[in-house]
Each structure stands twice: as C-alpha cells, then as structure tokens.
Image (spheres, helix red, strand yellow):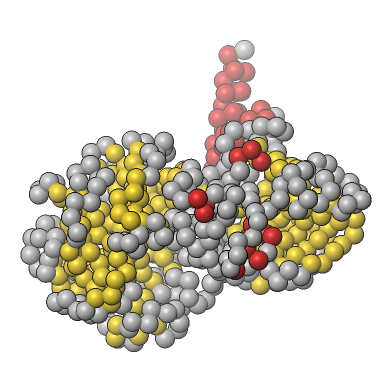
Amino acid sequence: MKHRRWICFLTIAVGFLICAQAQQTGSWGDQGDGTYRNPVLNADYPDVDVERVGDTYFMISSKQHMSPGMVILESKDMVNWTTIGHVWDRLSWAPEYNWNEMRGYRFGVWAGDLAYHDGTWYCYQIDSRHGLYMSSATDIRGPWTQPIQMLTNEKIFDDPVVFWDEKEHQAYLLCNTAKKQKRPENTTPGSENRLYKMSWDGREIQDSGKVIYTGPGAEAAKIYNINDTWYIFMAEWFVGDKETPLGRPSKKNDRKQLVLRSQTDSIYGPYEKKVVFERGNGFERSCSQGALMQAPDGSWWYMHQLIQNIGNPFQGRPQCLQPVKWVDGWPMIGKDIDGDGIGEPVRSHEKPINGFPVTAPPTDDEFNPGRLGVQWEWNHNPRDSHWTLAERPGWLRLKADRPVAPVKNYRIHGQLFWRAFNTVSQRIMGTSTGSAVARFDLSGMKAGQRAGFVRFGGIFHLLGVHVEENDTRRLFFMDMNGKELRGDAIHGNDLFIRTTNKGDRAAFEFSTDGERFTRFGPEFTIAFGFWSGDRLGFFCWNESGENGHVDIDYFHYDYDGPKQELKGAEKNGCLNDALR
C-alpha cells in the first residue's frame, strides 16, 4: 500500500512537472538556449517603466481608454514577462470613460511611472485632458488607492517620473508640460521638461517647478542617481544629425534616446547632453523611451519600445531589451555597430539572468468562474450588470443593449461598434503569424442582437451573428466603412469563429462543428490607431433594446512566439492526465 501511495504521489508530481514545463519558443523572446531575440515582449506594451524590488522586476504599460488601466507585468530575468494585474480597476476620474459615454478614445491612461519607496508602491500617470494622477498600494497586486489629482491639465501634459532623494530628504517629479520654450543653457527650443518638488509622501506638488531641459518632442524622462551622479534619460526627435521640431514619424526622422548628466551634485544641474541610442542594425522603427535596469551580477540593461511609425504599425509598440555598457561615465545602450559613438539595438543577445523558464503574458482563457483573465481589457469602463462568469460557469456571458447615443461632431461615434459598450479584447502577439479561435453559444440571442468576434485597433472588422426580426440567425461580416456582407442562416446553437493573420493581412472563418472551417468575408488589412495596435476580442449589442445575450466557451490563441502552454491548475485535465 505504501509503495502504491508513493507511486501515485510520484506520478502526480511528474505529471505536474511535465505540465508546468510545457512551453514553446518562437522567432522572438526567450530562445530556450540561454539567449533571447528582440523584441522580448512582442506585443502592444507602450510607455513602460520598470522597478526592481528584491529579485523581481515589475513593469507598467499604458493603454489609453482601455479598462482596467495601466497593466502590470513581472519578470525574474527581464526577458520573460507575465501579466499580474492592473493599477486602476476603472478609469474613474472622468465621465467620458464610462460605458454610457465612451468618448475617451486616444485619451485615458498615458505613460506612467512606477516607484517603490518605504514599503509603498506608487503609480503616476497623466491624462492630458484632466491632469496628473497618483495611486498607491502596499502590495503591487493591489488593492490600489483611488487616483489622487496632483496637477490639473492646465499645467501638465505627459510622461511623469518621480525620485526620492534620501540624502536631501526631498522628493521630485519631472514631466513634459508641452509648453514651448526658448533655449535654456545647453538645450534646443522645444517642449519644456519641468522639475517639481513633491511631498515626501508622494501626494502633493510643492512648487511651480523649474525648467531643466527643452527639446523637440522631448519627453519620457527617467531619473537615476548612479555613483552620486544625476542622470536623466529622455527621448527626442531628430532629422539626420540635427534636432527637429517636426516630431513626425517617418523613415527620415528618428526618435533617439539621449541622456542628461549633471555637472554638479544637484538634481537641478546644469546638465550636459549626449545621444546614446538610435535606430540601426536593421531596425526600421525608432528605438527609445524605456527604463534602465540592473541585474544581480551588476550588469546594466535597458528596456525600450519600438515606436509606431513604420515597419509593422498594426502591432503597436513592442518592448526590446538592450545591454548597457558604461563608457567615460555615459551609458552606451546596445552596441556601437557603425562606430559613431552611439549605440544601436541588438537583434539577439545572451540573457541577463539564466535559470528561469520560458513564459509569456496569458492569452488563452477557459472562462472559469471567478475573475476574468488579466489579459482582457474593456473598451472604456464596462457595464458590470451586462457581463458575467457566474450565471453559466465556464462561460463568459455578454448581455446586449443599445449602443451609446452618438455625440454630435464626435467623429468616432459615426459607427455602432465604437459606441457598443462591453467590447472585451486583448493584444495580438507578434507580427508574423497568428490564429485565434473561440466557441459561441447562440441560444440566448434575441431579435435585433449582434454578437461575435472582432479585430480592432485604428479600424475594426467583425464576424458574427445578427438575429433578424423573424428570429433568423444570420452570419455577417462588417468592416470600418460600414460595408456589410450577409451570409447563410445559422440553424444550430454552436458557432466557432477563427481569425488568422500573416503580417498585417487577416481573415475570418467560421464553423458549426469546430472541425470544418469556411472562409467568410474578404481578406483585410489590420492597422494601428487611437494609439493602439490590433486587438482580438468579442462584441455584443442590440439596436432594438436590452434583450439577448451570447455565451463564449473559450478563447485559444496560437502565434509565433514564447507561450506558456499550461495555465497551471486553472486548466482542467492536468491532474486527471497525471493520474491516468
């Protein structure tokens, strides 16, 4: 009997180990051999900041009008990142982000700063319509406090960064105010970056600030004090070797990473400047704006985004990891491949820290009861009465109602999709190939209702079912231009929708048995817009009123990149498989 018990326990343990180690690699991220390929986080995670506490790195990333806001990820090795939550459950500081208005496109949560001080987490971000906000938490997984407004939009624009100077016992906040200024010493005309004194508890601005740098599109500052020297990292626009006030994405323009180094022991400077990182080595998209990190062995690394100008604009802004070498007191980001003294991005490199498995943000979802997967975000704040995981365990239920009434002279509200609340979606992964499939139960749909699968970023494409007035369920495809293609009637309750993409070309397929899929609708182009890359998700509305619902059984997503095949104990079957 004892031997049988031990065999059973061993079988279970081995089964869990096999399940836990099931993973895949791809053309980017962790290669499984001690190296990585950029981007390491090949999805739309813009405007990141990274804070290391102990042996763990924590990252935040903005996503405008999506709710919950300010996603949080964690990593043990700077290469493999997984999502652990969000700072703000709702965008609560302005009515336009609510489900009954939906007027917050392009706005909401912009670039932020994550800080840890005296046992408390702080997150700062600027909504250019409303001002600077801060929330705090003792546990990064929450709960976070309600946002506190520290400055109004009349004084502030974007990209805050904070620093606690323990020596002087003074806290500071630096941001781009978007005001155009003449040249202070050692700078060029352009957007001003103003340094404010901040209260030690991180909740109040104490003065009117001092301009310490101006430059064309200069923003995204990060403050570091290394070996008693002040450094401010910042992104700025250039044409050739010259700074330009244009700030418009193109092959000619480049958004470069510069560093300011203080010539005194004061955070106010004066500062000298050096460009330390630029586009090159086959990267077409500008490389800048990110966070400096240090590994346990003392080596330095830099996480940065590829901006949304050329190359693969449908994706959004992914994250790349670069080694940093210090030369004469200046950081050299990447490698100086062309010998001009400025670093350029590396395509691949040895990992900063070994010994950790390949992982990635979650994508698949079986919609088990409890909390909706952290990968999902709503288009504006959700109407909580109209979605549930509890009414039918194992399924996500979306309940229909009329879209929000159009707002006069608000261009975005011209089409129903942009006004339909409770559209839920997640980021696409990678830029080469992807395939996502979901199973729908149509039995709860009512006359007038539309529901199904959507791909959207700057434009949208829908494949779903429209219930006609005679209760006929009919397949339909709709695009951004309002063009609708109507298909055959769907007689059963089961509908499977699959979408695939190769680069920026995508298409939809459907099936009634989950095995034989048929193409429906044209191949189409996916695109970046509203400061967002393409997303995969579900929609549901009813122009006739509050009637009907659709149930979604699962969402499965395959793509060319690292993925954790097993979701741990959340995935039913692992224990059963181990016991067989």
Q: In the picture, residue 239 is in which quadrant?
A: bottom left
Q: Quadrant of the C terminus?
A: top right
Question: Can residue 111 be seen in this snapshot?
Answer: no
Q: Is residue 159 above or below residue 89?
A: below
Q: Quadrant of the N terminus?
A: top right
Report the front residue among 335 and 11: 335
Q: Is residue 116 above or below residue 519?
A: above
Q: In the picture, residue 288 is in which quadrant?
A: bottom left
Q: Residue at x 31, y 77 (%)?
A: 216
Q: Residue at x 34, y 49 (%)?
A: 149
Could you say where residue 270 lies in the image, as x and y percent from the top left? 11, 69
Q: Residue at x 60, y 40 (%)?
A: 384
Could you say where residue 198 lies in the image, as x and y percent from the top left? 20, 50
Q: Is residue 13 above or below residue 517?
A: above
Question: Can residue 579 be seen in this snapshot?
Answer: yes
Q: Is residue 28 above or below residue 284?
A: above
Could you say where residue 293 lies in the image, as x and y percent from the top left? 30, 56
Q: In the picture, residue 147 is in which quadrant?
A: top left
Q: Residue at x 89, y 49 (%)?
A: 471
- As drawn, the residue found furthest toward the front would be 408
